[in-house]
Image (cartoon, helix red, strand yellow):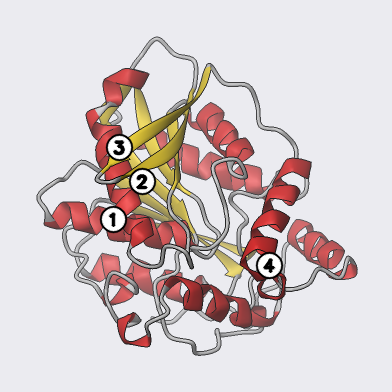
Amino acid sequence: MVLSTDRATRDPDADALVGKIRAGGQPPLSALGVEGARAYLEERAAQGSPGPDVELVRDATIPADERSIAVRVYRSASPEALPIVVYLHGGGWVIGSITASDAFCRRLARAAHCIVISVEYRLAPEHPFPAAVLDAEAAILWAAEQSDLWRGDARRLIVLGDSAGANIGTVAVRWLVAAGRQVVARQILAYPGTRADRAPSAGPWGQEWPLTDNERAWFFEQYVPDDAMRTHPDVAPLLADVSDLPPTTILLGGCDPLADEGFAYAQHLWESGVSVDLHLFSGQIHGFLTLDPAILPRAEEAVGLVANAIRAVGAR
């Protein structure tokens, strides 16, 4: 089965946002360079709407071998033990941070009535593959082992990632399963990157903001500079044995160059015996889940869908 997005049209909110960015003449992130792209993202995040208040927001540090991993923990108000979501942000393995993700994590904690642990995993090119996956694996184990610190329910541990974060997350979950550490109850993947080839994306969307084929290639060159590694299943999870992975929720945007590989991964999971819930937002662009609902109203609908998937884990 093949997903065709050739005839997809953007939802009005997505089309208005793309038109605004195009009119502003934003240069490609690759043209800004690594530091310039990072600074641009942080500036945009700072200009967005702040997230809602939640009961607890606390920075913490995870010790991991000879390094430490920064996390930010959000907890919705409740006397009960809550589900725990380990969140891995997108950004092509190169950009993004717990600060830039703050408003989204607040929205998610409030909507899903959960604990969110946002992970500051190491970024490329300073730390290429597999550094980010190692950090994600350590953060997931820490979240399971330290759940009592945040009054969390370790039996309801979910890994959520978007774009590159979804790639990192599903690989880390597979590592844990292979090691006999079945601590993750569900993975939620928004528009995951699952292939490593440089072939042009299907349909017209690889030439459009917010993610072009050229930028995809640039991001990948930072993350996996060694061409020989690009067919490794820990880089391209579409090539991996996924038969023992936990139930999975996948969100895709029909106007996203990653839609076809996300769909292929959903099919790969399903054919391998994994329970899969697939949700296609046919008129949405890359990144729609975490964008500010003030500028992309359907982002609120997507957060609600993710919140339902979180609440359903371990429901009695």
Q: Earlier in the sequence, mark 2 or mark 1?
A: 2
Residue 220 x %, y % = 48, 75
Q: CA distance from mark 3 to mark 4?
A: 35 Å
Q: Mark 4: which amino acid? A: Pro
Tell which tag, 2 or 3, sits nearer the viewer.
3
Task: Give the SS element for disc 4.
Answer: loop
Q: Earlier in the sequence, mark 2 or mark 3?
A: 3
Of residue 23 and residue 221, the one placed in the foreground of this image is: 221
Q: Earlier in the sequence, mark 4 or mark 2?
A: 2
Q: Earlier in the sequence, mark 1 or mark 3?
A: 3
Q: CA distance from mark 2 to mark 1?
A: 9 Å
Residue 23 x %, y % = 90, 68
Please give the label number shown on residue 159.
Answer: 2
Residue that mark 3 sits on? 63
Please give the label number shown on residue 172.
Answer: 1
Tell which tag, 1 or 3, sits nearer the viewer.
3
For this orientation, the residue located farthest to the top is 79
Task: Give the SS element for disc 2.
Answer: strand
Q: Mark 1: which amino acid? A: Ala
Q: CA distance from mark 4 to mark 2?
A: 24 Å
Q: CA distance from mark 1 to mark 3?
A: 17 Å
Q: CA distance from mark 4 to mark 1?
A: 26 Å
Task: Give the SS element for disc 1.
Answer: helix
- Asked if marks 2 and 1 touch (Cβ < 8 Å), the reply is yes
Going by the image, does 178 lie left or right of 101?
A: left
For this orientation, the residue located farthest to the left is 180
Label 1, residues with CA under 10 Å away: few <14, some 14-19, many ≥20: many
Q: Quadrant of residue 281?
A: bottom right
Q: Earlier in the sequence, mark 3 or mark 4?
A: 3
